[in-house]
Image (spheres, rainbow, N blue to C red):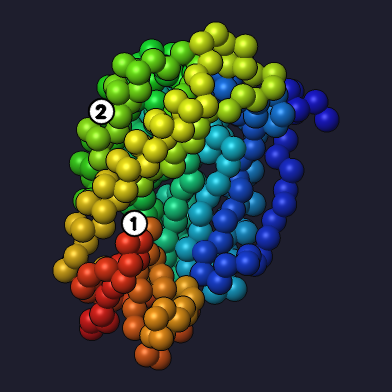
């Protein structure tokens, strides 16, 4: 198989997964983006997608086996279904009135009885259009939890990375999400110390992150990948500077995360229970809300894989909220 030319998706269906309540389903492989730091397009080939029919069959099997939540994953999930379209047709999906194959798939899966939650893994910011979010917010079971890959909040750094958006464009996409989903969880990835990143560029990124106010950030120090354009770029950032910058962003992330969790105190939420955990001699049932906030419920007679109405009362620890069951 020539991974640069083959568009056939290799079927790897599952009917059960290790988690008891949440199933991860890979629906897409390959990437056409060629970010300057990434080897994936060379290693995994061009984009190719699983058929909607096969995905739906698998989800139905999983729901019949008791799963209430699925997570759709892929190497570049936003490209799902695009390999069947011409370059002109793909470009037509980018304007605000565009309709993406991924949106069509989510709407189709939302019709499956017994499936209560759908999540999407990492998304390309440009897929977030008014039509995409408005439609999914009103007609699907999609959770208000969006992981939008950013990598840098500096326009110049993004250009060197060959990311195809600007900070201003990214921010507009976040505003669209928040327009249709109340208190949406928006998470992201950030690379610090990319080749050529000056102190001014880093400060620009830090300011942008604080402007967006993410619910959670995954922060990585840049590391060379053999065969990528970034490997040969000049002005590689020293390791000690990368470490210092990542520590600054970790501190910023912790403050943002706490602020987001604080917003749920005294609110009513629906938790999908997952597993019992003993914490300081007390038995709790742990689960997640639709926004992927981890919540502990005094266990009582709860079982895993139940949807439970709770009121958030405070913190069990810095990462887990405490709750009580309500009718």
Q: Is residue 196 visible?
A: yes
Graded by Cα atoms within 10 Å as few (under 14), some (14 to 19) or many (20 or more), the crowding at tag 1 reads some
Q: Quadrant of the C terminus?
A: bottom left
**Is 289 placed left or right of 62 in the picture?**
left
Q: Residue 326 falls in which quadrant of the image?
A: bottom left
* Relative to 241, residue 106 above or below: below
**Mark pair 1, 2: CA separation:** 25 Å
Query: Which residue is pictured at 27% across the width and 46% down the height?
Result: 256
Nearer the observer, disc 1 or disc 2?
A: 2
Residue 139 placed where, x, y %? 33, 52
* Relative to 191, residue 301 above or below: below
SS at mark 2? helix
Query: Which residue is pictured at 34% across the width and 56% down the height?
Result: 291
Residue 233 placed where, x, y %? 57, 11
SS at mark 1? loop
Query: Which residue is pictured at 37% across the width and 55% down the height?
Result: 143
Query: Which residue is pictured at 22% across the width and 70% down the height?
Result: 314
**Is 264 placed left or right of 161 in the picture?**
left
Residue, disc 2: 207
Question: Which of 286/120 is in front?
Answer: 286
Residue, disc 1: 291
* Relative to 49, residue 259 above or below: below
Q: Residue 33 falls in which quadrant of the image?
A: top right
Residue 215 placed where, x, y %? 31, 47
Q: Which mark is residue 116?
A: none
Number of labelled discs?
2
Residue 46 placed where, x, y %? 66, 26
Q: Is residue 138 visible?
A: no
């Amino acid at each position: 198989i020539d991974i640069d030319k083959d568009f056939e998706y290799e079927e790897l269906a599952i009917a059960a997964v290790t988690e008891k309540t949440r199933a991860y389903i890979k629906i897409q492989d390959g990437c056409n983006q060629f970010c300057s730091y990434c080897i994936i397009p060379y290693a995994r080939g061009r984009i190719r997608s699983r058929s909607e029919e096969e995905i739906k069959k698998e989800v139905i099997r999983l729901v019949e086996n008791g799963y209430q939540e699925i997570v759709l994953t892929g190497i570049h999930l936003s490209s799902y279904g695009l390999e069947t379209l011409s370059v002109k047709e793909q470009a037509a999906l980018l304007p605000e009135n565009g309709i993406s194959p991924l949106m069509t798939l989510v709407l189709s899966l939302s019709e499956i009885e017994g499936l209560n939650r759908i999540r999407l893994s990492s998304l390309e910011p440009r897929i977030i259009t008014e039509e995409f979010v408005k439609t999914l917010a009103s007609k699907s079971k999609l959770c208000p939890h969006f992981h939008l890959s950013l990598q840098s909040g500096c326009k110049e750094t993004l250009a060197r990375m060959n990311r195809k958006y600007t900070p201003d464009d990214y921010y507009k996409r976040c505003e669209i999400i928040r327009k249709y989903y109340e208190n949406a969880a928006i998470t992201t990835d950030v690379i610090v110390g990319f080749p050529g990143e000056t102190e001014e560029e880093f400060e620009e990124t830090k300011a942008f992150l604080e402007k967006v106010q993410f619910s959670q950030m995954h922060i990585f120090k840049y590391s060379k990948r053999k065969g990528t354009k970034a490997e040969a770029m000049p002005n590689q950032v020293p390791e000690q500077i990368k470490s210092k910058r990542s520590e600054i962003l970790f501190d910023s992330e912790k403050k943002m995360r706490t602020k987001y969790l604080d917003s749920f105190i005294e609110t009513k939420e629906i938790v999908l229970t997952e597993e019992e955990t003993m914490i300081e001699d007390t038995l709790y049932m742990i689960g997640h809300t639709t926004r992927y906030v981890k919540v502990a419920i005094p266990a009582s007679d709860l079982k895993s894989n139940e949807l439970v109405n709770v009121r958030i009362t405070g913190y069990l620890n810095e990462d887990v909220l405490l709750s009580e069951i309500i009718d």
